[in-house]
Amino acid sequence: MDPYYTLETAPGYLPGILARQHLAPDGTPLPGAVRQGESAVRRWLRAHLREAARGAYRHGVQRVAPAIRRLGEL
């Protein structure tokens, strides 16, 4: 199966996508890329931060926003 994005079809888009994954345009890891052991810690941390952000958003939508709407009606 051929890749959807190639340097020929997306020359301005593909390098950015690969750089976010710490890869060079040819697919090799960039110097200083995160080692395998560190990536597990980063995934764990990211998952917990995401849950905290999700909880804060839910609290804001369910508790804070209705209170602000009620205050706006006064």
Image (cartoon, helix red, strand yellow):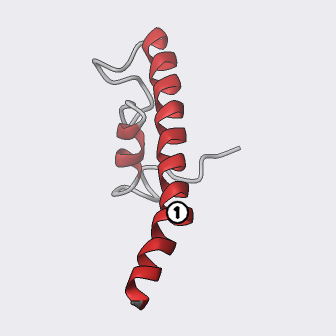
Within 10 Å of disc 1 (Cα), the crowding (few <14, some 14-19, many 20+) is few
x%, y% of residue 36?
48, 12
Residue furthest to the bottom in view is 73
- Name the side, left or right, on which 40 lies relative to 11: right
Element under disc 1: helix
- Closest to the observer: 61 or 26? 61
The spot of residue 40 in percent (x, y) is: 52, 17
Q: Dot 1 corresponds to which residue?
A: 63
Residue 31 found in image quarter: top left
Residue at the farthest right position: 1
Closer-to-camera residue (74/32): 74
Q: Residue at x 37, y 30 (%)?
A: 22
Could you say where residue 15 lies in the image, as x and y percent from the top left?
35, 45
Q: Position of residue 55 (x, y in %)?
A: 54, 47
The image quadrant of residue 42 is top left
Give the answer, above or below, for where 52 lies relative to 72.
Answer: above
In-front residue for pair 11/17: 17
Q: How many marks?
A: 1
- From what the image shows, is residue 6 above or below residue 39? below
Please tell me which residue is depicted at 37% across the width and 55% down the height of the picture: 11
Q: Quadrant of the C terminus?
A: bottom left
The kind of residue tagged 1 is Arg
Q: Residue furthest top?
A: 37
Q: Quadrant of residue 71?
A: bottom left
Q: Which residue is drawn at the image coordinates 45% and 31% (left, top)?
A: 27
Residue farthest to the left, as pictured? 32
